[in-house]
Amino acid sequence: MFAALARRLAGMLIVMFIVATMVFFLTRLAPGDPAALMLGEQASLADVAELRKTYGLDQPVIVQYALWLKELLRGNLGQSIFLQRPVIVAIAERAEPTFFLALLSILVATAIGVPAGIASAVWRGRASDQAVSGGAMLAASIPSFWLGLIFIQFFAVRLGWFPVAGYGPPGASFAERLYHLMLPASVLGIVNSALITRFTRASMLDVLNEDYVRTARAKGLSEARVILRHGLGNALVPIITVVGLTAALLVGGAIVTETVFGLPGIGNLVVSAVLRRDYPVIQGALIVIAGIYVLINFSIDVMYTLVDPRVKY
Amino acid sequence: MMETSVQERPLLDIRGLEVTFRTEGGDVVPVRGVDLRVEAGKTTALVGESGSGKSVTSLAIMGLLPRPYGRVSKGVAEFRRRSGAVVDLASAGQGVVRALRGNEIAMIFQEPMTSLNPVMTVGEQIAEQVRLHMALAPQAAMRHAVEMLSLVEIPDAARRAGDYPHQMSGGMRQRVMIALAMSCNPRLLIADEPTTALDVTIQAQILDLIERLRKEHSMGVLFITHNLAVVAEIADTVTVMYAGEVVEKANVRDIFHNSRHPYTAALVDCLPERARRDSNGRRIVAAIPGSVTSAAEATGCRFAPRCQRAVEACEAGSPELLVAGTGHEVRCFRWSEA
């Protein structure tokens, strides 16, 4: 068990190293110079060179890479070129809306997708199945920015139930901040529920034909218990996989949705960093997102062992 | 007078059972005109080839026909409850039959490898049923589950109750299935090919176990099999099915020594111990030529296309079940010539 865990951890570190390397060099591949961008078109070449020196951008790329990697190992993501503060602080400031948006969205998506998928499998071929399948197709086809605008127009502007945009004024309470996430989380939840619905339906259809489901019925159990305990209990592995991967995608920043709802999240941070060639911020944010990906994947694997005793490490 | 008539009734009395499946190509009738009896404390063997309707019949009794496509379209299946009350399983509501399932009527399936839930411990799978039907608290139900595992001779039952099915062999899993079936002390046990998927040595153990439990609990057993060697060992009475119909019913002795239906006779001839020797002294096991007629295309006797004794009349009309002796019925125009 410990040996397997150690192997697993080593694997995760290797993945992170590869991600770090790729992030560094891919960032450098894009044309553009942060120093020139920062000083504007009127700046003299000497000024630009001076600024490049300050941020170490005049060194050979391989040296920059070595220095960055060394700092990374010490947990230092570097200093933002434009934001005048450490990258880690810039990310931390933006983490909360992104994290809670992802969490709420995945809750909404699961709360819609899993029951809809079960109902659709249980009543396969009937009207309710077709309604669910059609709804899932529709949800998957709707662009989130469009649904976002419609929701803002209807629920925020017309009905006035929710704030139109933003994350509350400075000093807003936690409840107030969460309240600002309700509309964007509903939008992301609905859009992402489609995949979960389809996976749940397919997985349940497989399982409901199994001999042990017939055994469960032969025991005289109620149909609800047959479907939920014996059916869903065995259908969970693919469902956990798709819920986990969706969660990982959402943590990476729902850039479009954050923009539509004016949320100061990671997605916004990355976009503005890319536009300004703020290398340390781009690199740092991508490293953190990749790290969360790896951690979510790891927890998916751990959850397999919890729901299926046949899975062992 | 009411009392005695109830007492004389068999445990399970099926008359004229017909099952219809709705398919896209129209209705299919996989089982029709099935008459079948199981007496308390006795074993009735239901015999036939694959596709003869044995399993559909058993699922109809259990109320487990695949919904919404399958249904009992004719006939009655009267079951005598512990209380003495008689309930028609064919017409009773889902709730009534569900309350009997796993409780007064239990079933063992052919595939022990896939018939247990892989994500629940075997003890929990038994305890779940016990909690439901015997209204026991969780801990008492688990103790009862362990007792049932001991009853089916699983060594170290208390520890094995915590095992998952994949940690057990096929024979052990079938014992678990039997323990599950026996856990609420059923009056009727339906065993659908319970030994087919098992090694021969394990088969004998499982048969012995079912026999022992039948005697100890004076339980009626409906034993579904295609294996006549097994039938000879355990059955009191035998019902033979062919292409969805009962073709012969008799006690076990008459089936083997005085069978009246050519299909039954042919089946008995296929037993390895009946094999003839060819001129080189090698044993030749007999086979029935042809394959089962699909229920849809039959007009006359369904066995006629494969029957050595078929005459024109056999193709023209379908025979009814005719009385051929005490407790002996046969669906053949020419039974008396056998």
Image (tube, coloured by chain):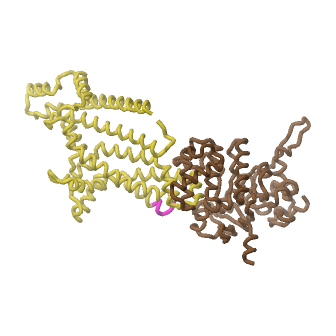
Chain colours: A yellow, B brown
Residue B301, compared with residue A57, is above or below; it is below
B113 inside magenta stretch: no
Q: Main secondary structure of the magenta part?
A: helix
- Is residue B118 visible in the rendered image? The answer is yes
Quadrant containing the N terminus of chain B is bottom right
- Residue B151: image location, x then y, percent: 65, 50
Image mark count: 0
Query: In the displayed image of the protein, which residue is found farthest to the bottom?
Result: B1
A127 inside magenta stretch: yes
- Residue A60: image location, x then y, percent: 21, 21
Identify the residue at horizontal 23%, vertical 60% (top origin). Answer: A162
Identify the residue at horizontal 85%, vertical 41% (top origin). Answer: B284
- Is residue B262 visible in the rendered image? The answer is no
B135 displayed left or right of A19: right
Identify the residue at horizontal 80%, vertical 65% (top origin). Answer: B318
B283 displayed left or right of B155: right
Quadrant containing the C terminus of chain B is bottom right
Out of B185 and A126, give the one closest to the viewer. Answer: B185
Out of B133 and A292, give the one closest to the viewer. Answer: B133
> Toward which corner of the image does residue A164 lie, by quadrant?
bottom left
Residue A108, compared with residue A281, is above or below; it is below
- Residue A287: image location, x then y, percent: 28, 35
The segment highlighted magenta reads A125-130
- Residue A102: image location, x then y, percent: 30, 48
> Toward which corner of the image does residue B285 lie, by quadrant?
top right
